[in-house]
Image: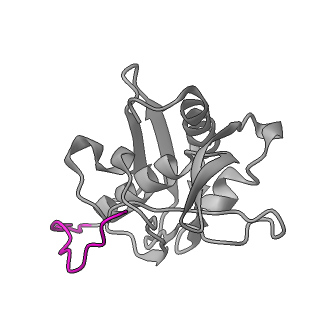
Amino acid sequence: FSGSAPGRRQNVVTAANLINGLLIPPRKIWSYNKGIGEINANKNFVPAGATENGILGTAVGGGVCQVSTTVFRAALFAGMPIQEWWPHAFREIYYEQGGWSPGYDASIQQPDDNWLGGTDFQFVNATDSWMLIRSSISSDSVLTVSLYGAPTGLTVKFDNPVITDETPVT
């Protein structure tokens, strides 16, 4: 998340700290929205750039999708089944840093009138053992999320997405 505005940086750090150390029971669904809880100022979230329903603006917690995206990628690499996933409506440069192709992002949204409703990122701990989430942030603003659990014996391979239709923003 290098190059982020101060508010976005704070929200990424806050969300990363909230999920660090969480345990996922065997064969259970993990929800990002439930993992971070309600996004509000009481948890140290601040207004920052955000996209809601495809509209660019500012919202408390703007930038938390950087963390949901990083968890999404960790779950993909671990071979965990994705239960719920919503890409952003528009390409964002933050999610293509480090050589990532478009399409490997995970947006979330918590509407004001429905706590923990809206869009979420969820995956299944498909193992018979508990899984631990660890997040860390380096001094050069690199967020890392690791999933620790029993060996699965899986080999995970994926390719860049196939883009079939592009609409230029005017």
Out of 46 and 148, give the one closest to the viewer: 46
Looking at the picture, tell me which residue is in the foreground, 138 or 10.
10
Q: Position of residue 124 (x, y in %)?
A: 49, 72
Residue that extends furthest to the top in the rendered view of this protein: 139
Q: Residue at x 20, y 70 (%)?
A: 161
Residue 58 lies in the magenta stretch = no
Please state the extent of the stretch shown in magenta in the rendering. Answer: 153-170
Residue 148 visible at all: no
Quadrant where the N terminus is found in the figure:
top left
Task: State which quadrant residue 45 falls in.
Answer: top right
Residue positioned 47% across, 47% down in the render:
66
Task: Decide if residue 30 is on the left or right side of residue 115.
Answer: left
Q: Is residue 16 left or right of residue 169?
A: right
| Residue name at image x 52 percent, y 60 percent | 130
Left or right of 45 in this view: 71: left
Main SS of the magenta segment?
loop
Question: From the viewer's perspective, is residue 133 above or below residue 7?
Answer: below
Render colour scheme: one colour
Residue 139 % position (x, y): 40, 19
The x and y percentages for residue 148 are 42, 50
Q: Is residue 66 left or right of residue 160?
A: right
Q: Nearer the viewer, residue 14 or 9?
A: 9
Question: Which quarter of the figure has residue 25?
Answer: bottom right
Quarter of the image with the C terminus is bottom left
